[in-house]
Image (cartoon, grey):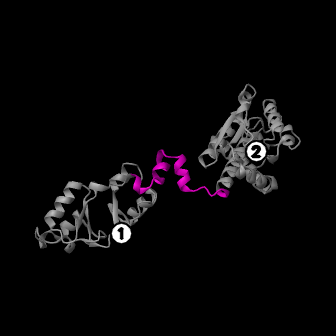
Amino acid sequence: MMTENSLKTLTSKNSPATVADAVLETEIAGLQKLRQTTLTDTAFTDAIKLLVSCRGRIVVTGIGKSGHIGRKMSATFSSTGRPSYFLHAAEANHGDLGLITKEDVVIAISNSGESQELFHTLSYCQRFGIPIIGITARQTGTLAQQSTYTLLLPEAEEACPLGLAPTTSTTLTLALGDALAVATMTATGFTADGFHVYHPGGKLGQLLTLARDIMHTGDALPLVTKGTSLMETLLEMSSKRLGCVGVCDTDGSLIGIFTDGDLRRHMSAVSQETPVDCMMSADPLMLNPNEPLSVVARTMSEKRVPSVFLCEDKCPKGILHIHDLLSRGLV
């Protein structure tokens, strides 16, 4: 383990792993201070109430390294259901202040609290009564004095032997942004369905897609009624190419499933005219069409089945095959 001041004693003779360990230990110590101070301050709770009640957009602004962190913070708010955009502090001074409306909340980031580029934005917000959540390390700085609520970053050693490069301070700001976004998301009751709306692409989007969105329906459904002969059943199975057939009673309720595995098991003991219900597997696995694909994939894996019927009140509405999930990288 590294000592608190070990970063200042590091030299080129230290291994990369030793240096990395010192960096992580320093930043972890900073995060612990953040957890014990800023997150327990009433200003944090007040800031969350302000963000929850915001009827406009959450405008995040900053410059330099604070600006980079601000971009990520804004993106996190947007992806968790709170409309947000990043406003570069320098661009704001050249005509972009008009983007901020009275319905918005501004999150201004400056470690020193004295970034000159922020001052016009702070003045504009003060003039029009737009609330400001300031994130800074200086309680006596201009940003802290001008903010509606100040989230004060704790004193923490930068993870840089020179103590100059923004490292621990940017990590703390990033973590604080995540805390703000997740606490706001939780307070507003944001759900997985909402997350899918903002993440339709990629694996996350696929996992949150509903079964009904990709299931085979209509004429693609392999179905026969109770009493159908083996020959007719095989024709239905072959034409639909899903390796199985659902067996329904006269009311249209699914009562069984017949697969190519069932055919192999019964082939020597049946004829072409044998009713399919004599060979089917009763009480087949059924899921609701509104289940997310993540649930479908997990259930199929646990039950070790290659296909599943999606039903409403036992009435088949669709079917999914394992290949439908494989093609989307979900299994």
Q: Which residue is mark 1?
A: 314
Q: Who's the residue at 37% across and 64% down the image?
A: 311
- Residue 83 image-quadrant placement: top right
User: Does the magenta portion include 115?
Assistant: no
Q: Who's the residue at 45% across and 61% down the image?
A: 295
Residue 223 seen = yes
**Drawn side of residue 133 relative to residue 277, left or right:** right
From the viewer's side, name the closer residue of 163 and 93.
Answer: 93
In what quadrant of the picture does the C terminus appear? bottom left
- Residue 89 image-quadrant placement: top right
Q: Which residue is mark 2?
A: 6
Mark 2 vs mark 1: which is more N-terminal? 2
Specify the segment rendered in magenta. 186-213
Q: Secondary structure at mark 2?
A: helix
- Residue 317 image-quadrant placement: bottom left
Is 324 drawn above or below residue 84 in the view shown? below
Q: Are marks 2 and 1 in contact (CB under 8 Å)?
A: no
Q: Residues within 10 Å of mark 1 (few under 14, many from 20)?
A: some
Q: Position of residue 213 (x, y in %)?
A: 41, 52
From the viewer's side, name the closer residue of 48 and 177.
Answer: 48
Q: Position of residue 306 (x, y in %)?
A: 32, 60
From the viewer's side, name the closer residue of 135 and 239.
Answer: 239
Q: Kindly give the residue lying farthest to the top in the view shown.
A: 94
User: Does the magenta portion include 187?
Assistant: yes
Q: Position of residue 130 (x, y in %)?
A: 78, 41
